[in-house]
Amino acid sequence: MSEYIILSIFLFLGAFIAAAATVTGLLLGYRTKNTKNKMAPYECGMETIGNARIQFKVGYYLFALLFLVFDIEALFLFPVMMYFKQIVTGQAGLSPAIVIIDLAIFMAILVSGLAYAWKKGILKWE
Amino acid sequence: MFVPSVTNPIGDFVRDMVPRITEFLPASFQSDTLNSVVAFLVNALICIIAVCAVNIGSAPILIYMERKVCAHVQCRLGPMRLGWHGTLQTIADVIKMLFKEVYAPSGADKLMFYLAPLIVLIAPFIVCALIPFSRDLVVADVSMGIPLIIAVNGFGVLGILLGGWSSNNKYSLLGALRSGAQMISYEISFAMILLFVVMISGSTNLMSITLGQEGTIFDWWIFKIPVLGFIAFILFFISSTAEMNRAPFDIAEAEQELTGGYHTEYNGTPFAMFYLAEYIALITNSALATTCFLGGFLPPCIGIGFVDNYLNMVPGVVWFFAKVYFMIWCYMMVRWTFVRPRVDQLMDFEWKFLLPVNLVLLVAGAAYITIGG
């Protein structure tokens, strides 16, 4: 428990250092007048055209969805993999054959998901 | 009342010292609770100072090292003017960075714009607290170390997306989106490799993963599982390079196409924070590779008695940092050797090559454990 308190201290520490640096930059930094050209977002040196809040490709979203599936799958596998050695040697009190068959079914569902996404052309980047 | 405590020799030392110091206080102030709270705070302070020194102190060294490695790869000398062989160059750069103007471009979401560097810096700091630097030098020895690292690594993507979107710049937006897509894609193979490590070591605690490699150099996970260990190490190297957005996987920052990527509009110290986060991530990823595959702080014993005795005399921290800097050197050599792939090649490489290979590796590892014991 106390380890997590220290971790939360580190969480705030990282944020604090970045915040302190930003404030230092704001205080020490050289300042010039805020003209329209200076404040304009950079665009190859030409005058900025329009806003950057534009629609973007749906492909990014599909990749994010796939990521969610596989990352959660990895998290689900962690507890099993941690005790895999003990399960296989029979120290965990479970039947190794049943666990391995269960794992195989789990992986098969996942791989078929990846194959489906592949066939549907989601993985193709245009 | 719940009293936090730190379990390592430094913690024990502080716990011994605190009652001896509080003896001098008036009797009404003395209590066991006060002692342990003070001991905890002192410990936390020591940890914070040590990790800050390692992180922030290493960044200028790494920047100098990167410049020199890059220069020598390209048959140049690199920085030579300021100090002996240009050693003071990075310090001068930091000072220059401090006096640059900090402003958000027009149309930017100011709150998000200044929040992004904060979020980017949090992730590597937490990972750094989890790494065992030596047999008794780990800031937070949590049992769920590896899942926590995966979770925290995912957090860094948020900062990049936030920074890119809030700048109101098309280059930033595209850079952030590409960067985000790349990082989450490679995060999967990153998690899968760590899953492989968890499977062969039977623990998610980084300290026990390291101690599981005790013995000679051939007990390190990279050599212990024949061939599979080495393949896993190479895959980890590839996916962590992509995780860190380093070349050859620095699509997001491809200068020729997207100027600076997600931090195009940042200048002064907030920009320096993105830079710092990148270099701390380099340290933490190398440290993770060292811990998971190269035996962490354990000396590279070769099984011959008198040689091992000499190797064991060197403290674990020295071995740890020697291995970490070797890994960092490898990352740098890769950066200056390989050419950058296109964005579609990059995504294809992850989803159509690395991920299937990872799944096969997991199954092969499981088979190895089942048959070979």
Image: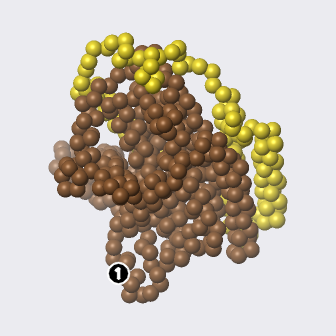
Chain colours: A yellow, B brown
Q: Answer left or right for B171 relative to A80.
A: left
Coordinates of residue B73 in the picture (x, y in percent): 39, 58
Q: Can residue A63 be seen in this view?
A: yes
Local packing at callout 1 (Cα closer than 10 Å; few below 14, some 14-19, many 20+) is: few
- Relative to B51, does residue A98 appear above or below in the rendering? below
Q: Furthest-bottom residue in view?
A: B305
Coordinates of residue B267 in the picture (x, y in percent): 35, 30
Given residues A53 and B194, the one toward you in this image is A53
Q: Answer left or right for B56 relative to B111.
A: left
Q: State which quadrant residue B324 falls in.
A: bottom left
Q: Which residue is drawn at 69% across and 62% down?
A: B361
Coordinates of residue B23 in the picture (x, y in percent): 20, 51
Q: Which residue is drawn at 24% across and 30% down?
A: B99
- Relative to A116, does residue A81 appear above or below in the rendering? below
Given residues B98 and B372, the one toward you in this image is B98
Q: Residue at x 54, y 47 (%)?
A: B340
Coordinates of residue B304 in the picture (x, y in percent): 44, 87
Q: What residue type is labelled 1?
A: Tyr
Q: Can residue A113 be seen in this view?
A: no
- Relative to B206, does residue A19 appear above or below in the rendering? above
Q: Answer left or right for B297 relative to B143.
A: left
Q: State which quadrant residue A32 falls in.
A: top left
Given residues B101 and B302, the one toward you in this image is B101
Marked residue chain, label 1? B
Q: Furthest-top residue in view?
A: A36
SS assignment at label 1: helix
Given residues B123 and B355, the one toward you in this image is B355
Quadrant (top left/top right/bottom left/bottom right) for the C terminus of chain A = top right
Q: Which residue is drawn at 65% across and 33% down?
A: A60
- Residue receiving disc 1: B310
Q: Answer left or right for B81 relative to B55.
A: left
